[in-house]
Amino acid sequence: MEFAKLEPIEDLRGFIKEHFDVDLPVRGGWGYDAATPVEIVDDTKLPKKQLQHIFATIRANIEMHLMQEKGKGYSGINVKEIGRTQEEDCEAVEYEITALPEKLYEKFINEYKAGYGKEDFDMEEHFRRRKEHTVSRKVKIYFK
């Protein structure tokens, strides 16, 4: 599954602050390659891996939800680090991103809420079907 790359912007930190109300100490590119890495610019109290994970989650939400037509996006977006390497002068972090089409996500959430705790609710079947409809993708984000 392919998603459009985000266009470069002048003020990455300001964009994230405006749209997500999070002040991430970053600048530069969206991290699609070593030529346009995400640069961590301030010493922060957050551990570097946590800051990188927050950025990856924000980028995934923009690509998979905000940039999609209404009703065609994804929800329940989860980001999990699966590896990291040094490439050129950047740290390349690989993530697995999973999500459900937003209409199915809503259906599964409502089904779970309605059935949870009831004797006839088959939770294993519910999660098996949910997993069956989950989209998974792997991305690499370059940080400097």
Image (cartoon, rainbow, N blue to C red):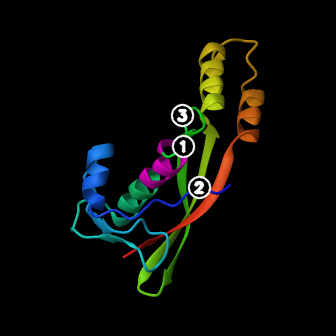
Closer to the camera in the image, 54 or 103: 103
Which secondary structure type mostly characterizes the magenta part of the structure?
helix
Q: Residue at x 55, y 57 (%)?
A: 4
Query: Which residue carries the number 3 mark?
Result: 70
Query: Which residue carries the number 1 mark?
Result: 68
Residue 14 quadrant = bottom left
Q: Image height check: is 68 above or below 40?
A: above
Tell me where residue 61 appears, x and y as whole percent: 48, 47
Q: Image height check: is 116 above or below 43?
A: above
Q: Residue at x 46, y 79 (%)?
A: 34
In the rendering, which numbered label is found on residue 3?
A: 2
Looking at the image, is mark 1 or mark 2 earlier in the sequence? 2
Disc 1 and disc 3 in contact, CB within 8 angstroms = yes
Task: State how far apart marks 1 and 2 are (Cα).
Answer: 9 Å
Q: Quadrant of the C terminus?
A: bottom left
* Mark 1 neighbour density, 10 Å: few (under 14) some (14–19) many (20 or more): some
Query: With 49 as the anchor, is 105 left or right in this view?
Result: right
Tell me where residue 6 appears, x and y as whole percent: 46, 59
Q: Which residues are magenta?
A: 58-66
Task: State how far apart marks 2 and 3 are (Cα).
Answer: 15 Å
Which type of secondary structure does the marked residue at label 1 adopt?
loop
Q: Amino acid at mark 1?
A: Gln
Q: Residue at x 31, y 52 (%)?
A: 16
Looking at the image, is mark 2 or mark 3 earlier in the sequence? 2
- In the orientation shown, which residue stands out farthest toward the bottom? 88
In the rendering, which numbered label is found on residue 80?
A: none
Task: State how far apart marks 1 and 3 are (Cα).
Answer: 6 Å
Which type of secondary structure does the marked residue at label 2 adopt?
loop
Q: Residue at x 27, y 43 (%)?
A: 21
Query: With 54 as the anchor, is 43 left or right in this view?
Result: left
Closer to the camera in the image, 127 or 8: 8
Q: Quadrant of the N terminus?
A: bottom right
